[in-house]
Amino acid sequence: MLRFSANLGFLWSQLPLLERIERAAASRFRAIELHWPYDTPADAVKEACVRHDITLLAANAPIGDPSVGESGLAALPGRERDFQQSFEMSLAWCVAAGASSIHVLPGIIDPQQHIIASRTLVSNLQWAADLSAKHGITILLEAINQRDKPGYFYSTQAEANAIREQCGRANIKLMFDVYHVGVAEGDILTKLAHYLPHIGHIQVAAVPSRAEPDEGEVAYAAVFERIDSLGYAGWIGCEYKPRASVEAGLAWLTPYRT
């Protein structure tokens, strides 16, 4: 049985976080994932999740300063201390809130710095993974397509997995976002099967619109069938931008709910 989580970075994004959790529960989601929830106290989020019988899956590590184009710190040479300080804050919040994973963003780099950026990223991820392992936290690596985020450190599953392998840490996994795979490289069903042993989380959205996964060029019925047949036991994150209200767009989920 497939299990779907509400990504509250995109769903009900206009509401305060605690209200988003309430809306997710009312819409029969049993798990949530977050982007950057750090302006809401972790204990309040944990209490809301307990009250609504919601599992908190993950949050994103801080991205640095978006006003100067930063979209993650982990691969930026010379910013190691900034990354460590921000990650320690994220880890403390996630442990207190009850999350089980943190998505670490490498950031946007100059291609000429790729070699040193790779070394920086691996070193930072090893440090973060070792720190997280003490709390049972998994680190997630997500390849993001170059159309949406030009210059991002990795855009393919092979690139993200190569970094995972170099790190040599069991609690570093891939976040397989079907939308990004569809935009960046295609061959989704084959890649799902190939990378499944290393996938810690899956996300979905329509290609190319990033709306509900019931339109566009990806046949999600086939994707969900493949995920199920592969025996994937984790959650599938609904990280899409609703065409209208979230509730109005949830009909696509009906066949997958009991």
Image (tube, helix red, strand yellow):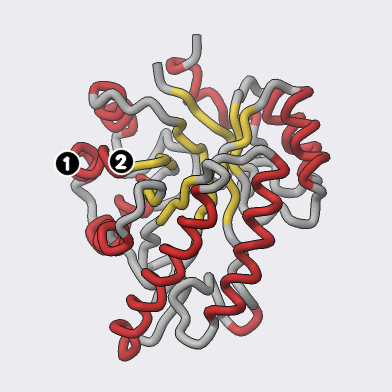
| Residue linked to disc 2 | 218
Q: Quadrant of residue 84?
A: bottom right
Q: Quadrant of residue 46?
A: top right
Q: Which SS class for mark 1?
A: helix
| Residue linked to disc 1 | 190
Tell me where residue 134 appears, x and y as whole percent: 54, 47
Q: Nearer the viewer, mark 2 or mark 1?
A: 1
Q: Residue at x 62, y 53 (%)?
A: 35
Q: Residue at x 42, y 33 (%)?
A: 214
Tell me where residue 94 appears, x and y as whole percent: 65, 47
User: Tag 2: Cα neighbours inside 10 Å, few (<14), some, or many (≥20)?
Assistant: many
Q: Residue at x 49, y 14 (%)?
A: 257
Viewer-nearest residue: 5 or 234: 234
| In the displayed structure image, the side of residue 29 where residue 18 appears, left or right | right
Q: Earlier in the sequence, mark 2 or mark 1?
A: 1
The amino acid type of the residue labelled 1 equals: Thr
Assign the N terminus to one quadrant of the image.
top left
| In the displayed structure image, the side of residue 180 where residue 37 appears, left or right | right
Q: Quadrant of residue 185?
A: bottom left
Q: State the count of labels.
A: 2
Tell me where residue 195 appears, x and y as whole percent: 24, 44
Q: Is residue 243 in sight in this rendering?
A: no
